[in-house]
Amino acid sequence: MSKQSVNDLKYELELKNAEIDELNMELQEKNEEINKLKLYSTKLKYANKNLEDKLDTKIDYDKARINELDDLSEKIKEKEAIIEDKQDQVKYLRSLIDDYKSQVNSNTENLEIQLRKISKTYEDLLKQKDLIIEKQDEQIANLMKSKEEIIKSNKTNVISLKLQNEKYQEIIDKLTKTN
């Protein structure tokens, strides 16, 4: 071989070595970038797991609240049954009072005094019944309002968490596709 071709080959070899060094540097940069992306992916996975745990906790809490509301609804039904029973009792008492009034016309003054006592008791019962009904109506309204607010809040929280979860899933998918 001639000296010129040996020099050309040495020059080419130096160029190839320089290219190899440059490619090795690029490869190392790519490895560092891959490692950074892996760390970021791991961080996102842990964040996603934390969000899922929070969502599960929130769902469990909401289920417990719904069970409480169901229990309260049962109690309301029981109270309504009691109210209906009391109303039947009041109707019965009214019919008794009507009977007593007809007896008053035919009986003595003493019976009139007794009838007045019964009427007073009846009025007190009606007042008590009205107070009970008002309080229970307020309680029912407050419970229904509270239930609606909880349901709205739960829906909002679930939607928000789903959107966040989808967003993180898209980021993870993008990162895993680029790897």
Image (cartoon, grey):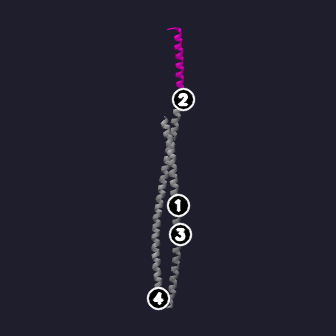
Crowd around label 3: few <14 · some 14–19 · many ≥20 (10 Å): few
Q: Which residue is mark 4?
A: 103
In percent of the image, x 51 and y 60: which residue is there?
148
* Pair 3/1: label in front: 1
Q: Which residue is mark 1?
A: 146
Residue 155 position in % (x across, y down): 50, 54
SS state under label 1 = helix
Q: Earlier in the sequence, mark 2 or mark 4?
A: 2
In percent of the image, x 45 and y 68: which residue is there?
78
Residue type at mark 2 is Glu
* Residue 99 against residue 128 in the figure, above or below: below
Residue type at mark 4 is Gln
Q: Earlier in the sequence, mark 3 or mark 1?
A: 3
Choose between 56 and 117: the one closer to the eye: 56
* Residue 22 against residue 37 in the figure, above or below: above
* Pair 2/4: label in front: 2
Q: Earlier in the sequence, mark 2 or mark 3?
A: 2
SS state under label 4 = helix
Q: Earlier in the sequence, mark 4 or mark 1?
A: 4
- The span shown in magenta is 1-27
Q: Earlier in the sequence, mark 2 or mark 1?
A: 2
SS state under label 3 = helix
Choose between 30 and 109: the one closer to the eye: 30
Q: Which residue is mark 2?
A: 29
The CA span between labels 3 and 1 is 16 Å
Q: Which residue is mark 3?
A: 135
